[in-house]
Amino acid sequence: MNRIRVNALGVLTVFLFFGANDLRGQIVTFDFAGLTGSEVSATSNFNANLNTSTITRGAGLTTSANADRFNATSWAATSIANAVTGNDYMEFTITPNANFQFSVSSIVMQIQRSGTGLTAVALRNSLDGYTANLDAQKAIVDNTSTQTITFTFSQANSTSAVTYRLYGYAEAGTGTGGPGDGTGNDITVNGSVTSTIAATISTSGTLASVDTTYGTASVAPSSFNVSGVGMSEGILVTPPAGYEVSLTSGSGYAATITVGAAGTIASTPVFVRLTSTATVAGSPYSGDIVLSSTGATSVNVATAASSVTAKALTITGIAANNKLFDGNTDATLSGTASLVGVVNGDVVTLGGTPVATFSF
């Protein structure tokens, strides 16, 4: 499912979903609308298979009120190095849920400052102990307008918590600044969240033969069960020629069906029968039913050899005329002969001259 939101100012925010186990796009967001600015912490408003994130300040910063912003004063002076030494940062942690991992491609922040507030910011994380910047140091323009700062970097497949710190320094210690006062989300983490469980298809049960008469689908279908874990999508069921499948025994048969959707697929019965168009000449029918899904190894389920018997046809439309016994049993027929029971659009032609005799 894709969800697109357009806010009142025309800014387009897009969340891209690729199933319950796989998300690419925005994986964590913070929106500070409604805050006074001096809260000790604030929580994320969107998390994709991740724990809720909480943003806090380092020990060197002081809370400072400013509506719709996660704000602070007492930022370092002169350099990011001074901010690191003085613990002048804001931080939040991304923690994946069990059996998930996350990757990050960029973090976008809307930052606002006072007239003597933030001059530059840098982003670091706990993977290297906050030693190196994740992207180049970013300058903050010397005005009080909200500015969008994008940190672009590559962090792949983290299966445990990672903390991100925004370090900054200001024109003056009394200057304020922080993320917020923007339109929509004030912090957006872009990347992906994927399952660490290998996609696996499992089956149970053995199929029996499903013999039938030409023109009629098998009256008594056979079945097996299929399930899956770690799936990025449903399981496609594809039978061999002559067969059709369904999720219910009495209806819904088709050349292929899909079982379940992304995530864990509970054990589900799949019903199998010969089609009404399976032929006598093609008998016996056999082969493997293929169960497939992106990211999973396909599984085959063997069918039992099944045959189609010929369908009996009835000739109607002619009758013997009554006669007086004249010493022989020959009968005279009248009417036009036709066949009853032709199916599947088959073309069947009656030929020759019908002969009949009376039995005395």
Image (cartoon, grey):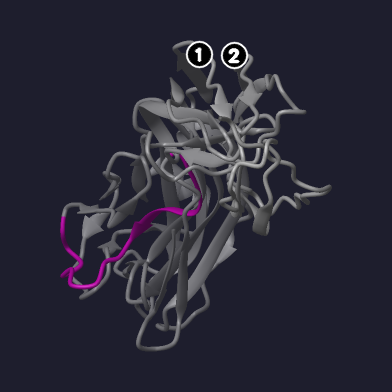
Q: Position of residue 199 (x, y in %)?
A: 53, 25
Q: Relative to 120, say whether 215 is above or below.
A: above
Identify the amino acid type marked 1.
Answer: Ala
Q: Relative to 305, say whether 94 is above or below.
A: below
* Disc 1 element: loop
Q: How far apart are labels 1 and 2 at the CA level?
A: 5 Å
Q: Write down the residue under mark 2.
A: 304
Q: Position of residue 19 (x, y in %)?
A: 46, 46
Residue found 37% across the figure and 67% down from its top: 186
Q: Write down the residue under mark 1.
A: 208
Residue 233 seen: no
Cβ–Cβ under 8 Å for marks 1 and 2:
yes
Residue 113 numbered tag: none
Q: Position of residue 133 (x, y in %)?
A: 58, 45
The N terminus: image quadrant: bottom left
Give the magenta part as a residue range: 21-39
